Amino acid sequence: MVKKGLLLYSGGLDTSVILKMLQDKLNMDVVALTLDIGQEENDLKAISDKAWKLGAVDVISKDVKTKFAKDFISKEIKADGLYDGVYPLSTSIARPLMSQEAVSYAEQHDCDVIVHGCTGKGNDQVRFEVSIKALNCDLEVIAPIRDWNLNRDNEMEYARKNGIPVKLGGKYSTDENLWGRSVEGSDLEDPRNPVPEDAYSWITPPYLSANEPLEVAIKFEEGLPISLDGKYLTPENLIAKLNSIAGSAGFGGIDHLEDRVTGIKSREFYECPAAMTILTAHKALERMTLNKEEVSMKNILDAKWSDLVYVGLWFDPILDHINAFENSVNANITGEVRLQLHKGNCRVVGMESQNSLYNYETSTYGKMDIFDQSMAKGFVNIFGLQTVNTTKARRNKIQELVRN
Ligand code: ARG
């Protein structure tokens, strides 16, 4: 029986060669699916035309930017998602969305296989395959670049022989969506090299960015950004606008030597101006609106959330449990944060919140002070009790310390 496969199709060299090979090698009927998640190369019409020309039996293209912002990016903002404390997971969080769309269309079109264009060295194969199987374990997954050992040379050769139009990409391997741009390969592969100027695209290199600082104000409601400089915007528009503002101030570049799931250390450069600005503001507002224990537990669960998402476990139920905690604490994170962006830096320069836990009258050293200092004496005695008891019992050791 002829198999029917759903191919996640970008229109680039890899997936174009795959589209043709699946027909040649496996006699497969191929449905091509292209998603607009905010990448620059988003001429869906041109990509669809190419898929039809290469013999697809059906071609689907869909703008999923709103869904991406609403169901994926928003969860990350609430969880302050940063892998290794620095990478805002821009590529990582798009993969479960793409998998979800692929499974949904594969089911609608009676496909038995989903095909993706990942190599065997990266994280994305893990994210796609675990997500697809978690959503429908009866679907088979094929990754021809990995499974058939394809490389740039034999792909180019095949493309030439089969009349596949080839538009050569730049010297770097890149991946883009609304939340960020990932760049790897070429000069970045030598960690001794600084990030070369030609690796930048969304961001003006900080050393070339404007001398004048920029200021932006972001309003949050229950943990999510709703307005920029007083203007209410949809999440995807707010992010797009902030990408260009913060990018022009040189902010949002991350030069990261990263540990992949596959055990490989890779050097990646990320451009995530909106993500880094929003996460900086969110983190600040959370310090104003959450108490010490809430912040402390949130830090632990945020780090766990980020690790789980990085390694591709978006659909593991543990993430639902963590998201329930994140929703609960984020219900308090409402307010406005002002930030100054300047030559690659972003500083919080002011914030306010109706839910602020900052209490001027207890914090001030000025005359408005209502804090009763006499309460502190007894508190300090009791607080230090166990330490003082222990050191008393071990006096010899302590005396040595004092004498030296
Ligand atoms: N290392 C990143 C991640 O696993 C991004 C990989 C994106 N691919 C690229 N060609 N730059 O999330």
Image (spheres, rainbow, N blue to C red):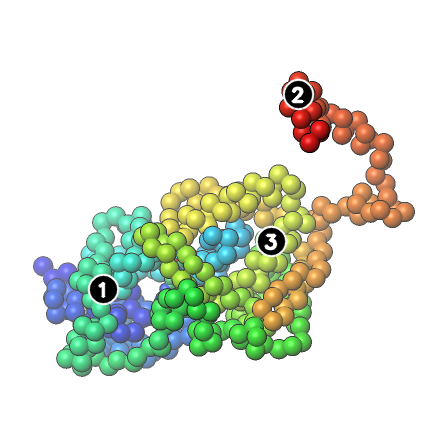
Disc 1 packing (10 Å; few <14; some 14–19; many ≥20)? many
Res 283 label = 3
- The residue most toward the right is 367
- The residue most toward the top is 393
Q: Is mark 3 within 8 Å of ligand 1?
A: no
Distance Cα–Cα, label 1 vs label 2: 69 Å
Res 145 label = 1
Label whose residue precedes the other's in the sequence (1 or 2): 1
Left or right: 18 in relation to 370: left
Find residue 198 and report its image quarter.
bottom left
Residue 144 location, x and y as percent?
20, 63
Left or right: 91 in relation to 381: left
Distance Cα–Cα, label 3 vs label 2: 46 Å
- The residue most toward the left is 1
* Element type where label 3 sits in the image: helix
Residue 340 location, x and y as percent?
66, 66
Q: Nearer the viewer, residue 5 or 161?
A: 161
